[in-house]
Amino acid sequence: MSTDEDTTTAGGRPAAETVIPGVLQDLLAAKGPSGYETAPAEVFRRAAASFGAQTHTDAVGTPSALVPPRGSEGGGRPAGAAAQAEGHAPRGSGPGGSPSGSGPSGGQPSAEGHGPPAEGNRRLIVMGHIDEIGLIVTHIDDDGFLWFREVGGWDPQILVGQRVTVSTAGGREIPGAIGKKPIHLLRDEERKKVAEIRDLHIDIGARDREQASEMVRVGDVAVLDAAPVPLPNGRLLSRALDNRLGSFVALEAARLVAQEGGAPDWELIAVAAAQEEITFGGSRTSAFSLAPDAAIVVDVTHATDAPGIEIKDLGKHPLGSGPVVSRGATLHPALFELLCEGARAQEIPFTIEASGRHTGTDADAVHISRGGVPTALVSIPIRYMHSPVEPVCIDDVHAAAALIAAMALRLSAETVLRR
Ligand SMILES: [Zn+2]
């Protein structure tokens, strides 16, 4: 925040102490606008395999990683849990998830890669989203400039003057810049107008259309070129913290639970949903195919210690105050209480956020999947959301993973999730 302070002593914590976990660094380095998530999904799978989770990727591009329950034998369903489960459609279309083509998901052979949980066990999914907002090339003009539309929600003011990287065939990355007419040349009335996406173009240094077309195709996507930078006070600045952070937290929670030998009587599946920023496509489909008994969605929320934020609307959750646990209309009260109990037991700081209707996250899709899924929402505060400079406090990220793991480890065969 303060540019004049000596960053080696600010807040009593040297800048050098901001340690970016290696997996998070790799997730952030990978580029993956909605629908083009192959690179970060690969990072997610590799990280999950490193702690022994079984990985799978579905047809939409959502990777998932399963941690089996601790002592998966002999944990029969209690009456309450059985009541909760009654009326569910069968989870899979056959043992081991082999598609029969007769169920509602017939014809999608990869949608049930994990199969149903063993008899007597239940299933918790912890879901971040792996996509990020980006740009898509719609036209290459005679002068070799690229015209584009947004993938996800951009404030066009953020885009002016940015460097971009266009991902092209064969994994090649082309640098470019988003250009705009210089201020000297703007007429008076133009100076007062805000930029619109359709007035902006990408300059990749091509001489003409022919040369540009050798480098880029219509339908290629770009992200802003902004490498992660450590800041003082355990803070990190990067693009795509929305929501590589959620994917990372899902992975970390799974790793912590795996380290304890699994959750009692509950499978945990970490999910990195594709396409959240455009359609909730990944969360809709994976909530359907995985048919969880409960879900925790992990996303980012607005840190309230930035200028212009109204805390009467949002509550108070500044950077460094821990994860934000949501309560509200679409979220399950019993899961909220379980998260609070886990946090208190482990002395993990957290704050509470309220939502009166939809949350703007994958929770909106997951909680109404099939006959309804008890769903919680855990968020990490960041500033300047949907920009290439989203600061986060790393301690909040670790605390979110610890909180979810603590809650998962408190689940048991006796856990009843009722409204
Ligand atoms: Zn977003």
Image: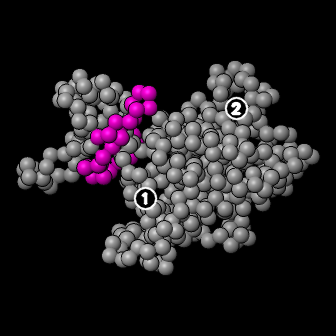
Q: Is mark 1 within 8 Å of ligand 1?
A: no
Side of 167 where 255 appears, left or right: right
| Residue occupying the point 21% across, 52% down | 194
Question: The C terminus lies in which quarter of the figure?
Answer: bottom right
Q: Residues under labels 1 and 2: Cα distance?
A: 37 Å
* Residue 315 visible in the current orientation: no
User: What colouring does the structure picture have?
Assistant: one colour
Q: Position of residue 244 (x, y in %)?
A: 52, 50
Which residue position holds label 1? 229
Q: Position of residue 353 (x, y in %)?
A: 54, 65
Side of 315 where 417 appears, left or right: right
Side of 365 where 137 appears, left or right: left
N-terminal-most mark, 1 or 2: 2
| Residue occupying the point 86% across, 46% down | 72
In reply to whether residue 168 is colored magenta, the answer given is yes
What range is drawn magenta here? 151-176
Indicate the amino acid at tag 2. Gly
SS type, badge 2? loop
SS type, badge 1? strand
Residue 305: quarter of image? bottom left
In reply to whether residue 364 is colored magenta, the answer given is no
| Residue occupying the point 59% across, 43% down | 44
Q: Nearer the viewer, residue 244 or 207?
A: 207
Q: Position of residue 363 (x, y in %)?
A: 58, 49
Task: Give residue 140's mark.
Answer: none
| Residue occupying the point 73% across, 70% down | 345
Vertical relation: 132 (above or below) 93 = below
Question: The N terminus lies in which quarter of the figure?
Answer: bottom left
Which residue position holds label 2? 113
Side of 200 where 5 appears, left or right: right
Q: Position of residue 27 (x, y in %)?
A: 52, 47
